[in-house]
Image (tube, grey):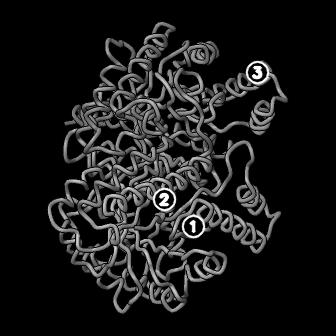
Amino acid sequence: MSLPLLPTTAVGSYPKPASLIEARRKFARKHLSKDELTELERRATREWIQIQEDAGMDLLVDGEQYRGDMVAYFADEMEGFAIAGLVRSYGNRYYPKPVVVGPVGRRHPVTVEWFKYAQSLTSRPVKGMLTGPYTIAEWSFNEHYPTRRELVLELARAIHQEVMDLQHAGAKYIQIDEPAIHTRPEEDFALAVEAMDIVTDGVSAYTVSHICYGDVPKIYPAMLKLAVNQLDLALKNEEFALLETFKKAPFTKDIGLGVVDAHSHRVESVEEIADGIRRTLQVIPAKQIFISPDCGLKTRMTEETVGKLRNMVEATKLVRNELTGTREHGNAATRVR
Amino acid sequence: MITTVIGNYPKIPDMPAPGKWRSAVEKFQKGQLTEAELHQVEDEVTLEAIQDQVDAGVDLITDGHIRWDDGQTYFARRLRGLSINGLQRYFDTNIYFREPVAEGEIAWVEPISVRDFEFARQHSPRPVKPVVTGPFTLAKLGRNTHYPSGREFVLALARALNAELRALQAAGAEIIQVDEPALCQHKQEYPVFAEAMAALVDGVRAKKVLCTYFGDVGGVYPQLLQLPFDVIGLDFVAGYRNWDVIARAPFTKTLMAGFLDARNTRLETVDEIKGAVRRITSIVPPDRLMIAPSAGLEFLPHGVAKKKLERLVEGTRAASQTLKGVRA
């Protein structure tokens, strides 16, 4: 299963259908069994795999239909966490923020069954999707470990086991998200790097880390030290301003290039997206680039999501053709001369 | 030595209840509630936030900023020349705010926070402290597409907010707090910051508090003491280095010391607070001290925020008793 030039992929989450949102509510009130909920989650996963195939994407995600939140999901499934309560993220959006109340660790594999299920639905590769240790620690309260360092490193060992299990289950691409990595760069960046060293130690699968929003220039080029093959970043929401940053020091890893805004309702046009990819090609070689949305799309409407994915794929095909076309043109010109 | 808070407070109760504010916003968004009805609910929740602070025994309170979407939007939306852009992460945490963008000349056109201050004061048996997000932080968390330089952007905001401070003073505010967390991240721009602070408080005679958090003031201390403020707020949790920083020169103003961690649920013990207060009183005398959390308590679950308020008062009182004992 080899990927084409400029492989198209996604960051992780997709919106949940209304029926699943309602089912999750019922489950929380114990009006629905776990099995019934799981069946609806599976159905939604099948739909998203189908949508991604139909759109023509190359490297798929399972859409995280079974997760509420990228940190709380892991906290729920692991030892050592409780849910402290609801904390505001923006407007009237609240999330259940975990609190570390004891030693953290895995009870059992967390994401492997869902990975296997999603991969069984398609012949295209599906990414294993994990939240990184630094982000789990930073986005949780901590009432147990005396220092953040101890908590982060213990989590890194647990997430490493999960990576190994995913790899064993056949995952060729594994993503470990660290959107919290630039919260305290002066104090903690080395710690986040050390944690990722532990997470991907001895892993042969292709690894990705998604880092989003926040002040990326502050941690560039230091972020290239993260022990992964690819860094997936949001370029579109700042209209590719990050390219200026990447001109200052060569981007030595592969990049997951965010080309559509995950927080706007507007579906970007094919030409607009293609333009963003072309601008990037002036700074980073094509063979290092994967094409992706800026971030998980779970807060978008389904139609917006499908529109963004379709246009992203069409724009990528356009640029792909230009690249191969250019090469043919070049050869022809040489022959003429 | 008194107790106070930095500003915001949880808007919703603990799970499983969604809380009336959250339900009201949802209904408002669906068009099932009028704006006036939503404001009514916000008033009710404000009264509850005031009650929590009063019950805990906090001496100088705020209205809990229940009506603030976020510290930037609340002010930016009603200043001329600014539009409100998409979501950004607040100091790279997983808390979001909407980015203000300068698209024209910035000007103050009407009171922004005065009505909320008056409402809180009418309904509080304790003194109420209005809080204004400072021009430097507004600029750093905003975007400038109008002014030729960052300095001019900050100064325009400072002049506009000066009118807000004057309006609060005219409404009877005896103490006004200005929040400038961005200073801790941008100390190299201190000259512009100082210039903005002078413009901000020009002609304002009320007692003025300059509040910093999410970091320390190493590098701008003791210069900070030259600014036209009566009280300086420092964070001793995220800015634990402030302990060393303020030992370098006599602290000549009143210190608002943020001792309780506003970003973690672990409850400080009375002994920890006593220890911190005792340590700080060797640097600043008790009559020039206010004890507070490190930042606003909004981003804790409600029950924990309330307990932190109680512990703040309990710990400070215990420390006062000990100090009196020492002196007697």
Label 3 close to label 1 by CB (< 8 Å):
no
- Tell me where residue B41 appears, x and y as whole percent: 74, 66
**Of the image marks 2 and 1, the number of the one nearer the N terminus:** 1
On screen, residue A52 versus residue A129, left or right, reads right
Residue at point 35%, 13% (across, down): A203
Furthest-left residue in view? Answer: B248
On residue A193, the disc is none
Q: Are marks 3 and 1 on the same chain?
A: no
User: Residue A258: x percent and y percent?
Assistant: 44, 42
Q: Which label is found at residue B296? A: 2
What is the chain identity of the residue bearing mark 2?
Answer: B
Disc 2 to disc 1: CB gap under 8 Å? yes
Residue wearing tag 1: B65
Q: Residue at x 43, y 11 (%)?
A: A164
The residue at 46%/22% (across/down) is: A103
* Amino acid type, mark 2: Gly
Observer-nearest residue: A16 or A5?
A16
| Coordinates of residue A299 in the picture (x, y in percent) | 62, 45
Give the Cα separation between the discs numbered 3 and 2.
Answer: 38 Å
Number of the front mark, 3 or 2: 2
